[in-house]
């Protein structure tokens, strides 16, 4: 059975959000922290409709355990106009950094205004783990390579970016590239 989702109702970024039962200060950062601390096999985060600000730096998905974190809009709307928006407020930061062995699934959300023109890789998402993106709209994210998503040299082969995901006005030197993948013939170079 699917896990009961952590419902995110507080739309402002805060390092001291609380996702305990009945709390009205549960924001996205606190919900992800709850998932990482509790380490269930699956952890669902459901965002209420509206604009959710993430402007205090990236949320790091660091779980070395077998937790899969899923983030979507509450009610799973089919119309992108009804998706919850995660907005970086042009604060020169990315939304998520996914560490090796970590797993993140995004669906039915809009990710907007992350990164900047001097970020080298992944304006919104920097992936070194396992990332699945389905029916996600990306808008106005910026980086030199992979304006929205960068799959780094350690990204797992199970990464999947759905054709139903949208790219709206992202910018990178590689002319509106949603995804940039880094591949090395003989392993990562430093």
Image (cartoon, grey):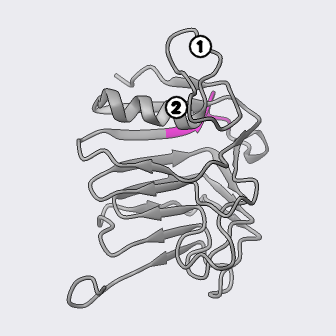
Give coordinates of residue 71: x percent, y percent: 52, 40
Q: Is residue 6 a member of the stretch shown in magenta? A: no
The quadrant where residue 172 appears: bottom right
Say the numbered circle drawn on residue 23: 1
Residue extending furthest toward the bottom: 185
Q: In the structure shown, which secondary structural element does the residue marked by tag 2 occupy?
A: helix
Closer-to-camera residue (131/145): 145
Q: Image check: 85 left or right of 122?
A: right
Q: Residue at x 38, y 73 (%)?
A: 152
Say the numbered circle drawn on residue 118: none
Q: Look at the picture and state if 146 lies above or below 38.
A: below
| Label 2 sits on residue | 30
Q: Look at the picture and state if 123 lies above or below 110.
A: below
Q: Look at the picture and state if 23 lies above or below 33.
A: above
Q: Look at the picture and state if 143 lies above or below 123.
A: below
State how far apart marks 1 and 2 are (Cα): 11 Å
- Per the rendered image, the range of residues in magenta is 71-77
Give coordinates of residue 115: x percent, y percent: 65, 66
The quadrant where residue 151 appears: bottom left
């Amino acid at each position: 059975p699917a896990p009961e989702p952590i419902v995110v109702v507080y739309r402002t970024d805060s390092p001291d959000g609380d996702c305990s039962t009945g709390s009205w200060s549960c924001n996205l950062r606190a919900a992800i922290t709850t998932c990482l601390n509790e380490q269930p096999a699956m952890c669902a985060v459901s965002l209420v409709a509206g604009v959710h600000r993430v402007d205090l730096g990236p949320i790091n998905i660091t779980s070395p355990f077998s937790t899969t974190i899923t983030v979507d809009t509450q009610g799973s709307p089919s119309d992108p106009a009804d998706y919850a928006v995660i907005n970086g407020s042009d604060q020169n930061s990315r939304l998520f950094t996914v560490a090796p062995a970590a797993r993140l699934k995004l669906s039915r959300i809009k990710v907007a205004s992350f990164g900047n023109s001097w970020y080298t890789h992944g304006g919104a998402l920097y992936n070194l783990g396992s990332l699945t993106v389905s029916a996600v709209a990306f808008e106005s994210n910026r980086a030199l390579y992979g304006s929205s998503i960068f799959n780094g040299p350690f990204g797992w082969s199970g990464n999947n970016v759905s054709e139903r995901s949208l790219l709206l006005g992202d910018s990178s030197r590689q002319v509106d590239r949603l995804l940039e993948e880094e591949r090395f013939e003989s392993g990562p170079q430093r």
